Amino acid sequence: MVAVGAATHPGRRLRNEDYFLHGVTPLGYVGIVCDGMGGYEGGEVAARLAAEAVFNYLQALPSTADPTRALEAAIQEAHKAICAYAQTTPSLTAIGTTIAVALITSHRRLYCAHVGDSRIYLYYKGEFSCLTEDDSLVQQLLAAGVLTPQQALQHPQRHLLTQSLGLGQNPRPHLKVHSLPSASLVLICSDGLTRELSVDEIQAILSKKAYSIQQMADELVLLAKEKGGSDNITVLLLAPGKSGIFAGHMRFSLPPQKYLIGGGIAILVVLVLGIFLQRRSSKATPPEQRYTEIVDDTTQVATLGVGASGEGEAPAEVEPTLSTPPAPEPAAPVSEPAPKAPPSPSSAVGFLYTVRKGDNLTQLARVFGVSREQIRRSNNLADDKIQVGKKIRIPVAEVHTHVVREKETLAGLARKYRTTIEAIQKANGLEADKIRPNQKLIIPVVRK
């Protein structure tokens, strides 16, 4: 099992040309961060193509494949995919991307591969070490002793890369393997993080034991933005479980036959009773989906109907559909009022999202923690094509609406609702972290 925390932000840039991807492959759990280049839309396309090409290549391999050779071949495939796309799109011929890939195997090995200046770090028992070396002009000058580390941070040509994917000659990925101690933490990031934060600042956040892994990712991105945010910022954290990354095999023996027979009868009785109660419940409960709306600590339950018009002040890009529930029947008088239950949204809900330029199903599925197939089924889509301006339903597990109070921040709301800053921004069409008091926000809960 691998715990994951991920966050990204455009910084002061108009567009976010970073892209990250993570998931299970036959070789192990992989995390990928790409920092695209190429101007309007070009960098975003290059980063997405590279990440998806590497992930798809690894997924198609057998579990017996050599991880080092697999990562090298996967990155070459990503380079070819970007070049092929550029040849068919004249306006995007000069596109490219960096890439950093971390593969965690079941043998507690960490395989690293990278091209460019996106980095991979390892944090373990208070020690924070960089596992990659930038492909940049400044790094070469630093290695040659021409520049000091402090001079390198301020050098005017620190953004110049010596190699990347999609531009120039075929890249030569850097490949390394490391042992992965128990309770360690792997950080993969774009240079938008390391330009703004020092090693000590990053380590201080990773050492906060009270933080969840998602809170660490959110805080790193937020702090980098507050320190300047001159570039896109992306953070991907991977934490292998203490008892192993993948579930192992357990030996067992069957109990005596008389216990098997008795247990089988008990299971049968429970199943029959469950079916009976489910049928009674389906007859008594109207078939409508519900979610909880939280406004100033009061709870209102509203029905969600796709295609209906919205009520109240809704964000520009998101239109939740609400209708007033029927009034409850008067209850018998009691001596004391019953205490109110805390708000707890039910599952299987969603919200309407207006497709913006540059959106695609892969991106939306990643941001909101669902699959492309779920989005397609919820909207009866025959393929992955979505039209700009069209409203589609995003089938997230929980949806809240929240009225912003004084001094509240997106990072605080993400922690409160156990979601991500990126999901709140995307759902509400926010280009920055600024929110104002009394602003009404849609809060989709992302399970990552």
Image (cartoon, rainbow, N blue to C red):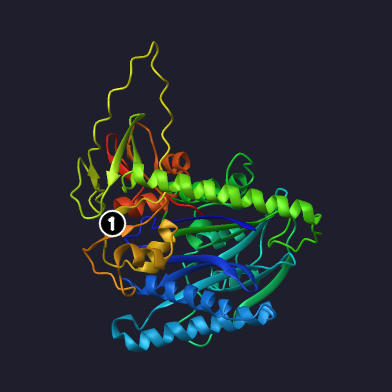
Front one among 124 and 317: 317
* Residue visible at 37% across and 62% down in the picture: 364
- Relative to 209, is 251 above or below? below
Question: What is the quadrant of the N terminus in the image?
Answer: bottom right
Front one among 160 and 235: 235
Residue 10 percent location from the top left of the image: 38, 58
Is there any visible trace of residue 213 in the rendered image? Answer: no
- Relative to 342, is 288 above or below? below
Residue 320 percent location from the top left of the image: 26, 48
Which residue is under mark 1?
353
SS of the residue under disc 1 = strand
Q: Based on the displayed image, in which of its 4 quarters is residue 261 positioned?
A: bottom right
Residue 286 percent location from the top left of the image: 31, 45
Q: Is residue 1 left or right of residue 318?
A: right
- Relative to 253, is 57 above or below? below
Q: Based on the displayed image, in which of its 4 quarters is residue 40 positioned?
A: bottom left
Q: Is residue 79 left or right of residue 368?
A: right
The amino acid type, in three-letter code, at marker 1 is: Tyr
Q: Which residue occupies the extreme left position in the image?
A: 309
Q: Is residue 399 left or right of residue 157?
A: left
Give the number of callouts: 1
Is there any visible trace of residue 81 in the rendered image? Answer: yes
* Residue visible at 40% across and 25% down in the picture: 340
